[in-house]
Amino acid sequence: MSIAAAELKKTPLNAAHRALNAKMVDFGGWDMPVQYPSGIIAEHEAVRTKAGLFDVSHMGEIRVKGPGALALVEHLTPNAVSKLEIGQVHYTAFLYENGTFVDDLLVYREGEQEFLLVVNASNSDKDFAWVQQHAKGFDCAVVNESDATGQIALQGPLAESILQPLTRTPLAPIGYYFFTHGEVAGIRCLISRTGYTGEDGFELYCAAGDTERLWNAVMAAGRPQGLMPAGLGCRNTLRLECKMALYGHEIDDTTNALEAGLAWIVKLDKGDFIGRAALLAVKAAPAPRKLVGFRTLEKRDIARDHMPVVRDGKPIGYVTSAAPSPTCGFNLGLAYVPTDLAKVGGRIQVEIRGRAVDAEIIPTPFYKRQK
Amino acid sequence: MFPADLKYTKDHEWLKPLGDGTALVGITHYAQDALGDVVFVDLPDAGESFGAGEEFGTVESVKTVSELNMPSAAEILEVNAALADHPEAVNEDPYGKGWMVKVHLKGALADGLLDAAAYEALVSAESH
Protein backbone atom coordinates (compact mmCIF):
# COMPACT_ATOMS: atom_id res chain seq x y z
CA MET A 1 0.00 0.00 0.00
CA SER A 2 2.83 2.38 0.75
CA ILE A 3 4.18 1.88 -2.77
CA ALA A 4 0.85 2.80 -4.37
CA ALA A 5 0.42 5.74 -2.04
CA ALA A 6 3.78 7.16 -3.08
CA GLU A 7 2.57 7.29 -6.68
CA LEU A 8 -0.48 9.39 -5.90
CA LYS A 9 -0.39 13.06 -6.82
CA LYS A 10 -0.54 15.51 -3.95
CA THR A 11 -2.07 18.95 -3.74
CA PRO A 12 -0.21 21.77 -1.96
CA LEU A 13 -2.50 21.12 1.03
CA ASN A 14 -1.55 17.49 1.57
CA ALA A 15 0.36 18.19 4.79
CA ALA A 16 -2.46 20.43 6.05
CA HIS A 17 -5.00 17.62 5.58
CA ARG A 18 -2.80 15.16 7.42
CA ALA A 19 -2.30 17.65 10.25
CA LEU A 20 -6.12 17.83 10.50
CA ASN A 21 -6.23 13.99 10.70
CA ALA A 22 -8.15 13.72 7.45
CA LYS A 23 -8.94 10.30 6.08
CA MET A 24 -7.09 10.26 2.78
CA VAL A 25 -8.18 8.26 -0.27
CA ASP A 26 -7.07 7.68 -3.83
CA PHE A 27 -9.35 9.95 -5.84
CA GLY A 28 -8.60 9.54 -9.53
CA GLY A 29 -4.88 9.26 -8.83
CA TRP A 30 -4.86 12.05 -6.25
CA ASP A 31 -4.27 11.65 -2.51
CA MET A 32 -7.33 13.56 -1.26
CA PRO A 33 -9.27 13.98 2.00
CA VAL A 34 -12.59 12.12 1.88
CA GLN A 35 -13.47 13.40 5.36
CA TYR A 36 -12.00 14.90 8.51
CA PRO A 37 -12.62 13.45 12.00
CA SER A 38 -15.95 15.31 12.26
CA GLY A 39 -17.38 13.03 9.56
CA ILE A 40 -19.32 13.41 6.33
CA ILE A 41 -22.69 14.24 7.91
CA ALA A 42 -21.31 17.00 10.15
CA GLU A 43 -19.31 18.46 7.26
CA HIS A 44 -22.37 18.31 4.98
CA GLU A 45 -24.49 20.09 7.57
CA ALA A 46 -21.81 22.72 8.15
CA VAL A 47 -21.88 23.63 4.44
CA ARG A 48 -25.69 23.79 4.40
CA THR A 49 -26.00 25.87 7.58
CA LYS A 50 -22.67 27.66 8.12
CA ALA A 51 -19.66 27.02 5.91
CA GLY A 52 -17.15 24.40 4.81
CA LEU A 53 -13.71 24.73 3.23
CA PHE A 54 -12.68 22.32 0.48
CA ASP A 55 -9.34 21.67 -1.17
CA VAL A 56 -10.02 21.53 -4.89
CA SER A 57 -6.45 22.12 -6.00
CA HIS A 58 -6.57 18.85 -7.92
CA MET A 59 -8.82 20.45 -10.54
CA GLY A 60 -7.12 21.25 -13.86
CA GLU A 61 -6.70 24.77 -15.25
CA ILE A 62 -6.09 25.43 -18.95
CA ARG A 63 -5.57 28.99 -20.20
CA VAL A 64 -6.44 29.88 -23.79
CA LYS A 65 -5.24 33.29 -24.93
CA GLY A 66 -4.72 35.04 -28.25
CA PRO A 67 -6.64 36.45 -31.22
CA GLY A 68 -8.28 33.07 -31.91
CA ALA A 69 -9.17 32.19 -28.30
CA LEU A 70 -12.89 33.02 -28.47
CA ALA A 71 -13.30 31.11 -31.73
CA LEU A 72 -11.50 28.09 -30.28
CA VAL A 73 -13.55 27.94 -27.08
CA GLU A 74 -16.76 28.40 -29.09
CA HIS A 75 -15.66 25.50 -31.29
CA LEU A 76 -14.82 23.28 -28.30
CA THR A 77 -17.89 23.87 -26.12
CA PRO A 78 -21.69 23.92 -26.61
CA ASN A 79 -22.54 26.93 -24.43
CA ALA A 80 -22.54 30.47 -25.89
CA VAL A 81 -19.08 31.77 -25.01
CA SER A 82 -19.54 35.07 -26.87
CA LYS A 83 -22.40 35.90 -24.46
CA LEU A 84 -20.02 35.80 -21.49
CA GLU A 85 -18.99 39.17 -20.12
CA ILE A 86 -15.41 39.67 -19.02
CA GLY A 87 -15.57 38.61 -15.37
CA GLN A 88 -18.35 36.08 -15.96
CA VAL A 89 -18.13 32.29 -15.81
CA HIS A 90 -20.37 29.52 -17.08
CA TYR A 91 -20.78 25.77 -16.88
CA THR A 92 -20.22 23.87 -20.10
CA ALA A 93 -18.59 20.77 -21.57
CA PHE A 94 -16.16 19.34 -24.06
CA LEU A 95 -18.11 17.01 -26.34
CA TYR A 96 -17.03 14.37 -28.82
CA GLU A 97 -18.39 14.53 -32.38
CA ASN A 98 -21.09 12.03 -31.30
CA GLY A 99 -22.37 14.39 -28.58
CA THR A 100 -21.05 12.44 -25.59
CA PHE A 101 -18.76 13.93 -22.97
CA VAL A 102 -15.01 14.38 -22.98
CA ASP A 103 -15.53 16.28 -19.71
CA ASP A 104 -17.57 19.03 -18.09
CA LEU A 105 -15.92 22.31 -17.12
CA LEU A 106 -16.19 25.96 -16.18
CA VAL A 107 -15.19 28.69 -18.63
CA TYR A 108 -13.96 31.95 -17.13
CA ARG A 109 -13.78 34.96 -19.45
CA GLU A 110 -10.64 36.80 -18.39
CA GLY A 111 -10.57 39.11 -21.43
CA GLU A 112 -11.99 39.55 -24.91
CA GLN A 113 -9.63 36.83 -26.11
CA GLU A 114 -8.52 35.14 -22.88
CA PHE A 115 -10.26 32.24 -21.14
CA LEU A 116 -9.52 30.03 -18.16
CA LEU A 117 -10.97 26.53 -18.50
CA VAL A 118 -11.34 24.60 -15.25
CA VAL A 119 -11.65 20.85 -15.77
CA ASN A 120 -11.88 17.68 -13.70
CA ALA A 121 -8.66 16.45 -12.13
CA SER A 122 -8.93 12.92 -13.49
CA ASN A 123 -9.51 14.24 -17.03
CA SER A 124 -7.00 17.06 -16.90
CA ASP A 125 -4.32 15.50 -19.14
CA LYS A 126 -6.92 14.17 -21.61
CA ASP A 127 -8.58 17.59 -21.75
CA PHE A 128 -5.34 19.48 -22.28
CA ALA A 129 -4.45 17.14 -25.16
CA TRP A 130 -8.00 17.60 -26.54
CA VAL A 131 -7.71 21.39 -26.50
CA GLN A 132 -4.22 21.34 -28.01
CA GLN A 133 -5.29 18.95 -30.73
CA HIS A 134 -8.15 21.24 -31.79
CA ALA A 135 -6.21 24.47 -31.37
CA LYS A 136 -4.35 23.97 -34.64
CA GLY A 137 -5.48 26.68 -37.05
CA PHE A 138 -6.67 28.94 -34.23
CA ASP A 139 -4.29 31.77 -33.43
CA CYS A 140 -3.92 31.34 -29.68
CA ALA A 141 -1.73 29.88 -26.97
CA VAL A 142 -2.95 26.93 -24.85
CA VAL A 143 -1.21 26.64 -21.49
CA ASN A 144 -1.71 23.96 -18.85
CA GLU A 145 -1.57 25.85 -15.52
CA SER A 146 -2.79 22.94 -13.38
CA ASP A 147 0.44 22.28 -11.48
CA ALA A 148 1.05 25.98 -10.86
CA THR A 149 -2.43 26.63 -9.50
CA GLY A 150 -4.02 25.92 -6.12
CA GLN A 151 -7.73 26.20 -5.46
CA ILE A 152 -9.90 26.18 -2.36
CA ALA A 153 -13.70 26.41 -2.17
CA LEU A 154 -15.38 28.24 0.70
CA GLN A 155 -19.03 27.14 0.58
CA GLY A 156 -22.04 27.89 2.71
CA PRO A 157 -24.37 30.70 3.76
CA LEU A 158 -21.64 32.33 5.89
CA ALA A 159 -19.04 32.31 3.10
CA GLU A 160 -19.25 36.01 2.33
CA SER A 161 -19.14 37.12 5.95
CA ILE A 162 -16.12 34.89 6.60
CA LEU A 163 -14.21 36.02 3.52
CA GLN A 164 -14.95 39.75 3.47
CA PRO A 165 -12.69 40.69 6.42
CA LEU A 166 -9.77 39.06 4.59
CA THR A 167 -10.02 41.16 1.43
CA ARG A 168 -10.42 44.76 0.30
CA THR A 169 -12.35 43.51 -2.74
CA PRO A 170 -16.05 44.16 -2.13
CA LEU A 171 -17.67 40.72 -2.31
CA ALA A 172 -21.37 41.64 -2.22
CA PRO A 173 -21.33 43.06 -5.79
CA ILE A 174 -19.91 39.80 -7.20
CA GLY A 175 -22.94 37.98 -8.60
CA TYR A 176 -23.40 34.21 -8.77
CA TYR A 177 -21.14 32.88 -11.55
CA PHE A 178 -19.08 36.08 -11.74
CA PHE A 179 -15.48 36.57 -10.64
CA THR A 180 -12.80 39.16 -10.08
CA HIS A 181 -9.14 39.36 -9.13
CA GLY A 182 -8.01 40.59 -5.75
CA GLU A 183 -5.96 39.87 -2.67
CA VAL A 184 -7.20 37.57 0.08
CA ALA A 185 -5.04 37.59 3.21
CA GLY A 186 -2.39 39.36 1.12
CA ILE A 187 -2.39 36.62 -1.54
CA ARG A 188 -3.24 37.29 -5.18
CA CYS A 189 -6.38 35.32 -6.05
CA LEU A 190 -9.02 34.84 -8.65
CA ILE A 191 -12.17 35.23 -6.54
CA SER A 192 -15.07 33.38 -8.10
CA ARG A 193 -18.64 33.21 -6.77
CA THR A 194 -19.16 29.61 -7.84
CA GLY A 195 -19.28 26.16 -6.31
CA TYR A 196 -20.39 22.55 -6.43
CA THR A 197 -22.55 22.38 -3.32
CA GLY A 198 -25.75 24.29 -4.10
CA GLU A 199 -24.88 26.92 -1.50
CA ASP A 200 -23.53 30.43 -1.85
CA GLY A 201 -19.77 30.50 -1.80
CA PHE A 202 -16.46 31.33 -3.38
CA GLU A 203 -13.80 29.41 -5.20
CA LEU A 204 -10.38 30.98 -4.75
CA TYR A 205 -7.58 30.27 -7.22
CA CYS A 206 -4.02 31.18 -6.29
CA ALA A 207 -0.41 30.27 -7.00
CA ALA A 208 0.26 26.71 -5.83
CA GLY A 209 2.87 27.91 -3.35
CA ASP A 210 0.40 30.27 -1.67
CA THR A 211 -2.36 27.70 -1.20
CA GLU A 212 -1.51 26.55 2.31
CA ARG A 213 -1.20 30.13 3.58
CA LEU A 214 -4.56 30.98 2.00
CA TRP A 215 -6.21 27.84 3.46
CA ASN A 216 -4.87 28.63 6.93
CA ALA A 217 -5.99 32.25 6.77
CA VAL A 218 -9.54 31.37 5.69
CA MET A 219 -9.75 28.53 8.21
CA ALA A 220 -8.62 30.82 11.04
CA ALA A 221 -11.07 33.55 10.03
CA GLY A 222 -13.98 31.14 9.74
CA ARG A 223 -13.56 28.80 12.69
CA PRO A 224 -15.22 31.19 15.16
CA GLN A 225 -18.27 31.25 12.86
CA GLY A 226 -18.43 27.46 12.59
CA LEU A 227 -16.37 26.90 9.44
CA MET A 228 -15.21 23.28 9.12
CA PRO A 229 -12.76 21.66 6.73
CA ALA A 230 -14.86 19.59 4.34
CA GLY A 231 -13.81 16.55 2.34
CA LEU A 232 -14.78 14.91 -0.91
CA GLY A 233 -17.34 12.69 0.84
CA CYS A 234 -19.67 15.57 1.62
CA ARG A 235 -18.79 17.30 -1.65
CA ASN A 236 -20.45 14.31 -3.32
CA THR A 237 -23.60 14.25 -1.15
CA LEU A 238 -23.94 18.04 -1.47
CA ARG A 239 -23.71 18.05 -5.26
CA LEU A 240 -25.97 15.01 -5.54
CA GLU A 241 -28.76 16.72 -3.57
CA CYS A 242 -28.59 19.55 -6.12
CA LYS A 243 -28.45 17.19 -9.14
CA MET A 244 -25.09 18.56 -10.25
CA ALA A 245 -23.49 16.13 -12.67
CA LEU A 246 -20.29 14.24 -11.87
CA TYR A 247 -18.10 12.96 -14.69
CA GLY A 248 -17.98 9.17 -14.68
CA HIS A 249 -21.49 9.06 -13.19
CA GLU A 250 -24.22 11.18 -14.81
CA ILE A 251 -22.01 12.11 -17.74
CA ASP A 252 -19.28 10.24 -19.60
CA ASP A 253 -18.39 9.10 -23.10
CA THR A 254 -21.58 7.02 -23.35
CA THR A 255 -24.09 9.74 -22.40
CA ASN A 256 -25.08 12.84 -24.33
CA ALA A 257 -25.77 16.30 -22.98
CA LEU A 258 -29.50 16.27 -23.80
CA GLU A 259 -30.41 13.02 -22.04
CA ALA A 260 -28.29 14.13 -19.06
CA GLY A 261 -30.68 17.03 -18.52
CA LEU A 262 -28.07 19.55 -19.63
CA ALA A 263 -29.91 21.03 -22.63
CA TRP A 264 -29.44 24.41 -20.95
CA ILE A 265 -25.70 24.35 -21.72
CA VAL A 266 -26.28 23.36 -25.36
CA LYS A 267 -26.88 26.39 -27.59
CA LEU A 268 -27.63 24.70 -30.90
CA ASP A 269 -28.26 28.06 -32.59
CA LYS A 270 -24.92 29.65 -31.63
CA GLY A 271 -23.05 28.34 -34.68
CA ASP A 272 -21.03 25.21 -35.17
CA PHE A 273 -19.26 23.39 -32.33
CA ILE A 274 -17.94 19.88 -31.86
CA GLY A 275 -20.89 17.56 -31.26
CA ARG A 276 -23.56 19.91 -32.65
CA ALA A 277 -24.57 17.75 -35.63
CA ALA A 278 -24.98 14.71 -33.40
CA LEU A 279 -27.03 16.62 -30.84
CA LEU A 280 -29.31 18.01 -33.58
CA ALA A 281 -30.02 14.40 -34.58
CA VAL A 282 -30.53 13.40 -30.92
CA LYS A 283 -32.98 16.26 -30.49
CA ALA A 284 -34.93 15.34 -33.62
CA ALA A 285 -35.49 11.72 -32.53
CA PRO A 286 -37.53 10.47 -29.56
CA ALA A 287 -35.22 10.19 -26.55
CA PRO A 288 -34.80 6.53 -25.52
CA ARG A 289 -33.88 7.39 -21.93
CA LYS A 290 -33.72 10.22 -19.44
CA LEU A 291 -31.89 11.03 -16.23
CA VAL A 292 -34.34 11.10 -13.31
CA GLY A 293 -34.20 11.58 -9.56
CA PHE A 294 -35.62 8.89 -7.30
CA ARG A 295 -36.00 7.94 -3.67
CA THR A 296 -36.29 4.43 -2.35
CA LEU A 297 -39.30 3.83 -0.15
CA GLU A 298 -37.76 1.83 2.71
CA LYS A 299 -35.07 3.10 5.04
CA ARG A 300 -33.05 -0.10 4.56
CA ASP A 301 -33.05 0.22 0.76
CA ILE A 302 -30.00 2.35 0.05
CA ALA A 303 -29.16 2.43 -3.66
CA ARG A 304 -25.55 3.01 -4.70
CA ASP A 305 -23.72 4.19 -7.81
CA HIS A 306 -23.94 1.87 -10.84
CA MET A 307 -26.69 -0.44 -9.53
CA PRO A 308 -29.11 -1.64 -12.23
CA VAL A 309 -32.65 -0.33 -12.69
CA VAL A 310 -34.77 -3.39 -13.51
CA ARG A 311 -38.20 -4.23 -14.90
CA ASP A 312 -39.42 -7.82 -14.51
CA GLY A 313 -35.92 -8.69 -13.35
CA LYS A 314 -34.23 -7.40 -16.52
CA PRO A 315 -31.89 -4.39 -16.55
CA ILE A 316 -33.45 -1.37 -18.29
CA GLY A 317 -31.26 1.37 -16.90
CA TYR A 318 -28.76 2.17 -14.18
CA VAL A 319 -28.16 4.32 -11.14
CA THR A 320 -25.54 7.00 -11.82
CA SER A 321 -25.17 8.26 -8.22
CA ALA A 322 -27.04 7.46 -5.03
CA ALA A 323 -26.64 7.93 -1.29
CA PRO A 324 -28.53 8.51 1.91
CA SER A 325 -29.21 12.26 1.83
CA PRO A 326 -28.16 14.11 4.99
CA THR A 327 -30.34 17.13 4.20
CA CYS A 328 -33.46 15.38 2.88
CA GLY A 329 -33.31 12.54 5.39
CA PHE A 330 -34.12 9.80 2.89
CA ASN A 331 -32.22 7.66 0.38
CA LEU A 332 -32.01 9.32 -3.02
CA GLY A 333 -30.34 8.79 -6.34
CA LEU A 334 -30.12 9.66 -10.01
CA ALA A 335 -30.70 7.08 -12.72
CA TYR A 336 -31.05 6.68 -16.46
CA VAL A 337 -34.42 5.08 -17.18
CA PRO A 338 -36.46 4.52 -20.37
CA THR A 339 -38.34 7.68 -21.28
CA ASP A 340 -41.76 6.05 -20.82
CA LEU A 341 -40.93 5.52 -17.13
CA ALA A 342 -39.36 8.94 -16.59
CA LYS A 343 -42.36 10.65 -15.00
CA VAL A 344 -42.42 12.29 -11.59
CA GLY A 345 -44.58 10.15 -9.31
CA GLY A 346 -43.86 6.99 -11.29
CA ARG A 347 -42.28 3.86 -9.84
CA ILE A 348 -39.10 2.10 -10.84
CA GLN A 349 -37.22 -0.80 -9.30
CA VAL A 350 -33.55 -0.73 -8.36
CA GLU A 351 -31.68 -3.96 -7.83
CA ILE A 352 -29.79 -3.76 -4.55
CA ARG A 353 -27.55 -6.79 -3.97
CA GLY A 354 -29.86 -9.09 -5.92
CA ARG A 355 -33.09 -7.68 -4.46
CA ALA A 356 -35.42 -5.54 -6.62
CA VAL A 357 -36.69 -2.68 -4.43
CA ASP A 358 -39.29 -0.03 -5.20
CA ALA A 359 -38.35 3.58 -5.79
CA GLU A 360 -40.42 6.63 -6.63
CA ILE A 361 -39.38 9.20 -9.22
CA ILE A 362 -39.38 12.59 -7.52
CA PRO A 363 -38.68 16.17 -8.65
CA THR A 364 -35.10 17.42 -8.87
CA PRO A 365 -33.08 19.12 -7.62
CA PHE A 366 -33.73 17.28 -4.37
CA TYR A 367 -32.54 20.35 -2.49
CA LYS A 368 -32.66 24.01 -3.42
CA ARG A 369 -31.37 26.76 -1.19
CA GLN A 370 -33.64 29.60 -0.12
CA LYS A 371 -32.29 32.80 -1.64
CA MET B 1 -9.00 0.36 20.41
CA PHE B 2 -8.39 -3.40 20.78
CA PRO B 3 -10.12 -4.76 23.92
CA ALA B 4 -8.33 -7.89 25.16
CA ASP B 5 -11.49 -9.84 26.02
CA LEU B 6 -12.68 -9.93 22.38
CA LYS B 7 -11.95 -12.22 19.46
CA TYR B 8 -11.54 -10.62 16.05
CA THR B 9 -11.99 -11.59 12.41
CA LYS B 10 -9.82 -10.56 9.49
CA ASP B 11 -12.96 -8.83 8.14
CA HIS B 12 -13.09 -6.54 11.20
CA GLU B 13 -15.93 -8.05 13.21
CA TRP B 14 -15.51 -8.73 16.92
CA LEU B 15 -17.02 -11.46 19.09
CA LYS B 16 -17.30 -11.21 22.84
CA PRO B 17 -17.92 -14.58 24.59
CA LEU B 18 -20.13 -14.03 27.62
CA GLY B 19 -19.15 -17.32 29.30
CA ASP B 20 -22.55 -19.01 29.12
CA GLY B 21 -22.38 -20.21 25.52
CA THR B 22 -23.61 -16.87 24.23
CA ALA B 23 -21.69 -13.96 22.73
CA LEU B 24 -22.10 -10.43 21.40
CA VAL B 25 -20.99 -9.53 17.87
CA GLY B 26 -20.19 -6.15 16.35
CA ILE B 27 -17.67 -4.38 14.13
CA THR B 28 -14.36 -2.98 15.26
CA HIS B 29 -13.26 0.58 15.79
CA TYR B 30 -11.12 0.26 12.68
CA ALA B 31 -14.14 -0.89 10.64
CA GLN B 32 -16.41 1.93 11.80
CA ASP B 33 -13.69 4.44 11.11
CA ALA B 34 -13.21 3.10 7.59
CA LEU B 35 -16.97 3.20 6.92
CA GLY B 36 -17.56 6.70 8.22
CA ASP B 37 -20.99 7.83 9.44
CA VAL B 38 -23.19 4.74 9.80
CA VAL B 39 -26.80 5.40 8.75
CA PHE B 40 -28.39 1.94 8.76
CA VAL B 41 -27.66 -1.55 10.08
CA ASP B 42 -29.61 -4.39 8.45
CA LEU B 43 -29.80 -7.31 10.88
CA PRO B 44 -31.39 -10.77 10.74
CA ASP B 45 -34.28 -12.10 12.82
CA ALA B 46 -33.85 -13.97 16.09
CA GLY B 47 -33.75 -17.69 15.47
CA GLU B 48 -31.76 -17.54 12.25
CA SER B 49 -28.49 -19.50 12.15
CA PHE B 50 -25.26 -18.68 10.37
CA GLY B 51 -22.04 -20.57 9.73
CA ALA B 52 -18.62 -19.09 10.45
CA GLY B 53 -17.86 -16.43 7.86
CA GLU B 54 -21.44 -16.36 6.56
CA GLU B 55 -23.06 -12.99 5.85
CA PHE B 56 -25.67 -12.12 8.47
CA GLY B 57 -26.39 -8.49 7.63
CA THR B 58 -25.07 -5.26 6.19
CA VAL B 59 -23.94 -1.95 7.60
CA GLU B 60 -24.54 1.15 5.48
CA SER B 61 -22.67 4.42 5.84
CA VAL B 62 -23.16 7.63 3.88
CA LYS B 63 -20.57 6.63 1.35
CA THR B 64 -20.56 2.84 1.26
CA VAL B 65 -22.00 -0.50 2.39
CA SER B 66 -20.24 -3.42 4.01
CA GLU B 67 -21.26 -7.00 4.69
CA LEU B 68 -21.38 -8.35 8.22
CA ASN B 69 -19.91 -11.83 8.54
CA MET B 70 -20.56 -14.13 11.49
CA PRO B 71 -17.25 -14.74 13.32
CA SER B 72 -18.20 -18.26 14.47
CA ALA B 73 -21.16 -20.60 13.86
CA ALA B 74 -24.10 -19.28 15.86
CA GLU B 75 -27.83 -18.74 16.20
CA ILE B 76 -29.24 -15.24 16.61
CA LEU B 77 -30.82 -14.73 20.05
CA GLU B 78 -31.36 -10.99 19.92
CA VAL B 79 -30.53 -8.00 17.74
CA ASN B 80 -29.64 -4.55 19.03
CA ALA B 81 -32.96 -2.83 18.37
CA ALA B 82 -31.56 0.54 19.48
CA LEU B 83 -29.51 0.72 16.28
CA ALA B 84 -32.69 1.25 14.24
CA ASP B 85 -33.01 4.77 15.62
CA HIS B 86 -29.39 5.32 16.61
CA PRO B 87 -27.09 3.74 14.03
CA GLU B 88 -24.46 6.31 15.00
CA ALA B 89 -23.82 4.22 18.13
CA VAL B 90 -21.71 1.98 15.87
CA ASN B 91 -19.35 4.93 15.30
CA GLU B 92 -19.47 6.31 18.80
CA ASP B 93 -19.15 3.11 20.81
CA PRO B 94 -18.36 0.16 18.51
CA TYR B 95 -17.51 -2.24 21.38
CA GLY B 96 -20.34 -1.12 23.66
CA LYS B 97 -23.65 0.44 22.61
CA GLY B 98 -22.82 -0.36 19.00
CA TRP B 99 -23.09 -4.15 19.46
CA MET B 100 -25.17 -5.72 16.70
CA VAL B 101 -26.35 -9.21 17.61
CA LYS B 102 -26.37 -11.53 20.62
CA VAL B 103 -25.85 -15.14 19.58
CA HIS B 104 -25.84 -18.67 20.91
CA LEU B 105 -22.53 -20.19 19.84
CA LYS B 106 -22.65 -23.57 18.13
CA GLY B 107 -19.68 -25.81 18.90
CA ALA B 108 -16.13 -24.59 19.37
CA LEU B 109 -15.09 -21.11 18.28
CA ALA B 110 -14.03 -20.97 14.64
CA ASP B 111 -10.38 -21.47 13.77
CA GLY B 112 -8.73 -18.34 12.54
CA LEU B 113 -10.23 -15.90 15.02
CA LEU B 114 -7.58 -13.44 16.15
CA ASP B 115 -6.72 -12.26 19.62
CA ALA B 116 -6.28 -8.54 20.27
CA ALA B 117 -2.53 -8.52 19.58
CA ALA B 118 -2.88 -10.39 16.29
CA TYR B 119 -5.75 -8.16 15.17
CA GLU B 120 -3.81 -5.03 16.06
CA ALA B 121 -0.93 -6.28 13.93
CA LEU B 122 -3.33 -6.94 11.05
CA VAL B 123 -4.82 -3.45 11.24
CA SER B 124 -1.40 -1.91 11.55
CA ALA B 125 -0.31 -3.69 8.36
CA GLU B 126 -3.46 -2.59 6.50
CA SER B 127 -3.14 1.05 7.38
CA HIS B 128 0.55 1.51 6.53
Image (cartoon, rainbow, N blue to C red):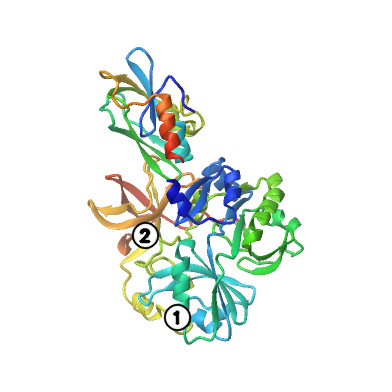
Amino acid at dot 1: His
Q: Which residue lies furthest to the top in this view?
A: B20
Q: Which of the pair B100/A356 is nearer the observer? A: B100
Q: Mark 1 points at which residue?
A: A134
Percent of width and height locating residue B52 = 27, 28
Chain-order first, disc 1 or disc 2: 1
Residue at image position (25%, 18%) is: B107
Percent of width and height locating residue B62 = 46, 44
Chain ID at mark 2: A
Percent of width and height locating residue A171 = 71, 63
Spatial CA span between label 1 and label 2: 40 Å
Q: Which of the pair A288/A119 is nearer the observer? A: A119
For label 1, the SS is helix
Can the viewer see residue A7 in this picture?
A: yes
Residue at image position (47%, 77%) is: A132
Q: Could you tell me how many numbered marks the image carries? A: 2
Residue at image position (31%, 19%) is: B104
For label 2, the SS is loop
Amino acid at dot 2: Lys
Q: How crowded is mark 2: few (under 14 residues within 10 Å), some or many (20 or more)?
A: some
Q: Name the residue under label 2.
A: A343
Chain ID at mark 1: A
